[in-house]
Amino acid sequence: MRHLSVILVLLAIIIATHEKAPAQVYNNEPPVDGLFADGGGFINTKPVPYPPLRKADVMWQKRLWRVIDMRQKINQPFYYPVEPHNHWRNLITVIMDALKEGTITAYDVSTTDEFLVPLTHQEVVNRQVDTLHKTFKRPDPPYNEFDSVVYTNFDPTKIMRFRIKEDWYFDKQRSQMLVRIIGICPVMMKEMNGEEFPEPLFWVYFPEARPVFAKSLVYNRHNDAMRLTYDDIFWKRMFGSLVYKESNVYDRRISEYASGLEALYEAERVKNELMRFEHDLWEF
């Protein structure tokens, strides 16, 4: 009986202690910053599949090379935001992150625009490390001069252009003029002797990069509820570009045989030929 009384007293003490102790609930999940926890369900989207195509149905084909200048207002979604935030990253950040993860492959651009020599993420970064020899003067007597080497690391904010390689073709089965982007190439703008010149970095096989682009959100300046991805922008042709080369037997660019306004007129001529070709097919 005595032991039973001791046990009851101990149970009463334990119950009283737990009632006084505050209840603590640990939740490791962060609060939802927005209406949906997954960013509106667009993080895990898949790219729109290409329509099936038979070689026998392609009755006409033309390859073009274009340049997208991100200093144009329509192309600014490719450049901003400079710092990633709210699921938004600029296009070069998306590409470099995918190269680092190994989900897409970079190809050497030094000799050709074909996808022949693959490059690793570290090789791409190392190629953009510039070494500059400078002469400095010491701040203390005797103020003698000394030579030093200044290293400049890769700066993604200097990527101001993208080149794209695309194939236009007419599908007689669907009676449509269609286009497929084959490759995309970031271009860094560098300065030398007060002049600016482009330096292409590497080529990316666009069909391989589409799953990555389809999961990367782009800021929509018109409506936050209408989420866009980089794959949407390329698929819907929501960008401005200038033709700088078309397939030719000399493998030369427009700038090699035209300059100034003549080069702009030539680029417009190449672009208008596509529309004129499709129009003439249905002219009665």
Image (cartoon, helix red, strand yellow):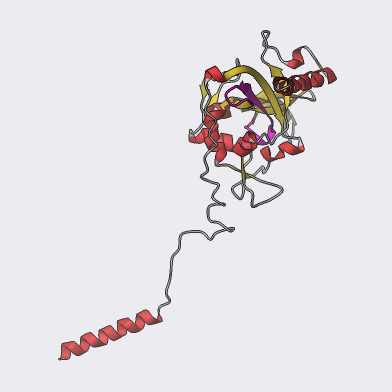
Q: Nearer the viewer, residue 42 or 272?
A: 272
Q: Is 82 rendered above or below residue 116? A: below
Q: How many marks?
A: 0
Name the residue located 54 percent from the left edge and 31 percent from the top edge. Answer: 50
Q: Is residue 219 visible?
A: yes
* Residue interval drawn in magenta: 152-177
Q: Is 77 rendered above or below residue 270? A: below
Rendering quarter of residue 199: top right
* Residue that sits furthest to the left in the current view: 1
Q: Is residue 145 visible?
A: no
* Residue that sits furthest to the front in the current view: 284
Name the residue located 21 percent from the left edge and 87 percent from the top edge. Answer: 6
* Residue that sits furthest to the right in the current view: 261
Main SS of residues in magenta:
strand
Q: Residue 268, percent across and down?
A: 78, 22
Rendering quarter of residue 15: bottom left
Q: Nearer the viewer, residue 136 or 140?
A: 136
Q: Is 240 rendered above or below residue 27? A: above
Q: Is 205 rendered above or below residue 246? A: below
Q: Residue 200, percent across and down?
A: 65, 24
